Amino acid sequence: MRFQLLNRLLLILAASFLALSCDLPRDQKNTLKRVQSERRVRVGLIENEPWVRRGASGEPTGVEVELVRRFAAELGVTPEWLWQNEQEAMEALKRFEFDLVVGGLTESTLWKDEIGLTNSYFTDRIVVGTPSSAQTVKGIEGINVAVERDDLLTAALVSEEDATPVRVENLSPATETAAAHDWQLEQLGFNLTDIELQKDEHVIAVAPGENGWLGRLEEFLKAQRPAIKNMLQQEFGEGR
Amino acid sequence: MRVREAFKMPADKEEKLRRAQRLEWVTIGFMLSIIAVIGLALGSSQAMKAAWVEDILSLVPPIAFLIAVRFRSKEPNERFPWGYRRAMSIAFLVAALALFAFGSYILVDSILKLIAAEHPTIGTIEIFGRQIWAGWVMIAALAYSIVPPVVLGHLKLPLATELHEKVLYTDAQMNKADWMTGIAAILGIVGIGYGFWWADAAAAGVISLDIVKDGVQNLKQAVFDLMDEECTTVGEEKKDPLQTRLRRELKKLDWVKDASVRLREEGDVLTGEAFVIPRGETNLLENLERAAEQIRSLDWRIYDVSIVPMRSIENEGKGDGN
C-alpha cells in the first residue's frame, strides 16, 4: 500500500519537475515581474563610504550604487533612489516597500533572518601591510602600526593583536607598517602580509522570499565580481 | 545473597540479535551520511530543518539499542541482584522522550513561523561554475535521505518481532516512515520554488506532527513498560499469549489444583510469579522444582518465574482468569 503511494508520489514529483523546473524559483510577491513591467526598481540607500556615497549635488554614487545602475540597465529599468537610515531601510524592505537595499552590508548583518541577502559578491579583508622595502613580518605584537585617523575599527583590531595603533592622516608606504583594507594597501603600494585582522563578506539586501528576483541579482553580481576591486580603488582614489 | 541466574539466549536468537546489531550499525552509518548531506544543503527552509532534526533523532533508538544490548548481558550481582535486563526499557524511554521533545519544538517553531508569515529566502549557489537555485540541491539531498532508511526499516521489522525488541521495533517503524518526511520536505521546498511562502512552514508542521505522534505513542508504551503493564506483543500491543499458555501448562500438572500467573516484561524477557494451589503437600518441593524446569523450557523468553504454592488464589475476579 505504502509503496504504491510512494511510487505514485515520486512519479508526480518527477513529472512536475521536468515540466516546470525551468522557471523556478518564482517570487512570493512577484518582484521580478513587477520591476520589469513597471520599468523601475525601488532602491533603499544607506550612506556608507565607499559603497554608497552622497555626491556633491546630492546624487548617489559609490560602488554599490554603480552596481545597481548597471543591474537596472541590464534589466532596462530605472532606479528610484531613497536615502534612509539602516533601521528604516530594513523595516521597509521587510515589508516589501523596497526591492533592494544597498549600504555596504555584510553577511553578518543583524537583519539577516528577516530579509533576503545575496551571496557574497566581494570579500573585504583588513590586513597588515609593510613598507615596500621591508622584509616579511610574522606578527605585529609590540610594534607600531599606522591606521587612518578616522578608522576606529582597524585601530581596535590592531590593539587586539597587542600592537600599538598610530593614527595618521595619510598612510605612507615608505616607512611604516600599516593596517587597512587589502585593496587600499595594494593601491598605496604596501606589501601585503598574511596577517588578516578582519574579513567581511559583502552582500546586497532584497525583500524576504523573493527568490526569483534574488537569483537574477546574484547572477548579475557573479559577473561583476572581478570588477569590484577596481571600482573600490577608483572610489578611494577620488575620495583622496 | 542469592542473585538471579544469568539469562541465556538460545543460539538461533543470539544469531538474530547479532544481525539486528549489525543492521543498527549500518543504520547509524547511513543516517550519519544523510545528516551530513542534508546539513550541507540546509538553507532557510523550515521543512528541511524538520526533516534534518528527525534524521538526527533517528540516531537515538539505534544508539540506545546498541548500548542497552551491551549493558543488559552483564550478569546479575550483589549490587544489582535482578541483573541489567531493564536497561532496554530505560533506553526505550529515552528514545521516546527525545522523539517527543524535538517533535514538539519543531511543531511550535513552525506554527510561529506561519503566524509571523515568514517568507523563506533561498538564493542560488555556484556548482562547477554554474549558478543554480539552492532549492534543487536541497531537494537532491532530501531525495538521497529517502531510500536507505526505508530499506533498513523493512529489514529490521521482522527481527524486532521475533526478538521481541520494542526499541528495535520503534526504530524500524521510524525508518519505514522516514520517506514521508523526505517527501513532505521536498514538497515544502518545491512550494517555495513556486512562490508559496506558507508551503514550507506547513510541510514542516506536518512532519513535526508525525514526530510528535510517534513520540507520544512510544512515550506511553515506555512508561507503561516501566510500570509493569501486563505483557503485550510487539507492535500491535495485544495481550501476550504466553501468559495464558503458561497458566494452562501449570494447570495440566496432576498435582496442581489451580494456577494463576502474574508476569511483567523486562525488555525482551518475561519474568514474575506463578501461583499454584497444590492438591496435597506430598513431594511438594520436588514437584515445584520440576514445574520450574518445565516452565523454563516452554519458551525462550520465560526467565526467572518463581512458583509460589498457596492455599487459595484470591482476587481472581478483578482479572480475567490467568
Image (cartoon, grey):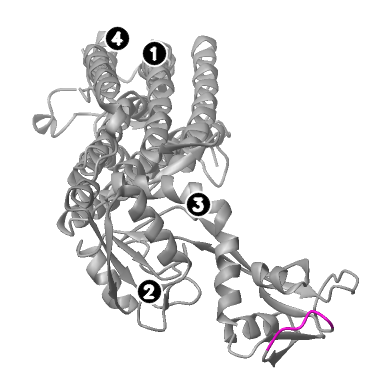
Query: Judging from the image, what secondary structure is the residue with disc 2 in?
Result: strand
Instruction: Name the one closer to the observer, A225 or B59.
Output: A225
Q: Nearer the viewer, mark 1 or mark 2?
A: 2
User: Which residue corresponds to mark 1?
Assistant: B299
A89 drawn magenta: no
Q: Are marks 4 and 2 on the same chain?
A: no
Numbered label tally: 4
Question: Which label number is shown at residue A224?
Answer: 3
* Magenta span main SS: loop
User: Which residue corresponds to mark 4?
Assistant: B253
Residue type for callout 2 = Pro
Residue type for callout 4 = Leu
User: Which residue corresponds to mark 2?
Assistant: A60
Q: Quadrant of the C terminus of chain A?
A: bottom right
Query: Judging from the image, what secondary structure is the residue with disc 1 in?
Result: loop
Q: Is residue B228 above or below residue A12?
A: below
Residue stretch rendered in magenta on the structure = A170-174
Q: CA distance from mark 1 to mark 2?
A: 86 Å
